Image (cartoon, rainbow, N blue to C red):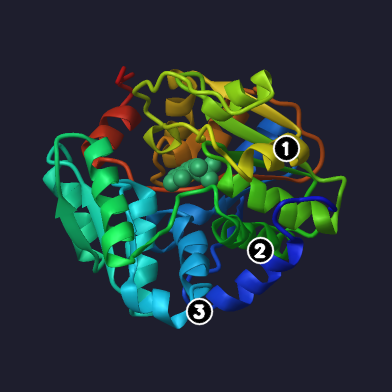
Amino acid sequence: MTNTPVPYSAIVEARRRIDGLVLKTPLCFSPTLSELAGNPVHIKFEHHQVSGSFKPRGAANAILCLDTEAKKRGVTGASTGNHGRGLAHAARQAGIRCVICMSTLVPANKVEGIKALGAEVRIVGASQDDAQVEAERLVHEDGMVMIPPFDHPAVIAGQGTLGLEILDQCVDVSTIVAPLSGGGLISGIALATKTNRKEIRIIGVSMTRGAAMHASQKAGKPVKVEELATIADSLGGGIGLDNAFTFKMVRDLVDGIVLLSEDEIMQGIDHAYWNEGEVVEGAGAAAIGAMVAKRMDVSGPTVLVASGKNIDMKLHHRIISGERISI
Ligand SMILES: *Cc1c(COP(=O)(O)O)cnc(C)c1O
């Protein structure tokens, strides 16, 4: 891979840097999905990762790339979801201060979840935008470092370590299917795997409701899309109109994007539970859902990335009991 905005060597360095701080998650063969696809299908159990998603890979790498002075001042962010959890976890592992800013609307269980991972929580304002302003104030006034969720070279390189693991665990992998939101995960995986074997196909899966990266690729530049509620809540949000890395990497390295309906995502959650015995969240079930709904042609050994498990368990219970929920 030449001309990528993040070099392959950054992923190899990230793997060494975060070794011991994140888990090497299992790759599990799925008999039922293999039967369905007519090809061997494996699931990368990244929902077993510490903090419940792959996010600590990128967060830990970004933190460890900071110089001593920056580490002393600590890191901040305004994500209440998996990035906030991953950042909190990685900061505690590295022994540095972490402040996650949230609005008063954030439910108490999310606040407690992030506190339990060792971060300070600052509750400000009535919207996520207000929380973002507070995080920016901490950067400007206290010198804290903002670690963004996807559009950052050290974050992309950290997520790419997941791709190196897939190559180790499935040497003849031919297609990799991963969920796609801001594109940090899929950019890292695509760079890691295609550098070693350029014939590997990479497919991204987003939800129909508010797929910002898909709309941006179609437009040929980063565009804003209306944010809609979705069962795959970890895939919501824009890619940033000033996107510097992931827009180009997805354009150059990803072979196709599949958009799933809410029902297809719930089928993925169902399949993971009833056939694989696994609890995964909506975003985490996207690749499985795309396979179950036969939304892509695969040939050869295929790896589906299950990216996270952080779902409200009462909601999960309703879905696997057959209820079809519109958010
Ligand atoms: C963040 C996240 C994604 C999307 O990752 P991007 O790097 O933004 O594309 C997918 N699944 C889960 C569970 C996540 O937390």
Q: Nearer the viewer, mark 1 or mark 3?
A: 1
- The reply to whether residue 14 is in sight is yes
Badge 1 marks a residue whose secondary structure is: loop
Can you tell which quarter of the image residue 320 is in? top left
Q: Are marks 1 and 3 in contact (CB under 8 Å)?
A: no
Disc assigned to residue 268? none
Q: Residues within 10 Å of mark 3 (few under 14, many from 20)?
A: few
The mark nearer the N terminus, 2 or 1, is 2
Please name the residue shown 27% across and 61% down the image.
Answer: 141
The mark nearer the N terminus, 1 or 3, is 3
Please name the residue shown 33% across and 46% down the image.
Answer: 81
Q: Foreground: 149 or 255?
A: 149
- Dot 3 amino acid type: Gly
Q: Foreground: 74 or 159?
A: 74
Q: Is residue 153 above or below residue 230?
A: below
Can you tell which quarter of the image residue 56 is in? bottom left
Q: Are marks 2 and 3 in contact (CB under 8 Å)?
A: no
Q: Quadrant of the C terminus?
A: top left
Q: Position of residue 126 (x, y in %)?
A: 14, 35
Please name the residue shown 54% across and 30% down the image.
Answer: 289
- The reply to whether residue 277 is in sight is no
Q: Name the residue beneath numbered marker 2.
A: 165
Q: Position of residue 235 (x, y in %)?
A: 45, 35
In the rendered view, does 178 fall on the left or right side of 322? right
Q: Name the residue beneath numbered marker 3.
A: 20
Badge 2 marks a residue whose secondary structure is: helix
Q: Position of residue 197 (x, y in %)?
A: 85, 54
Q: Residues within 10 Å of mark 2 (few under 14, many from 20)?
A: many
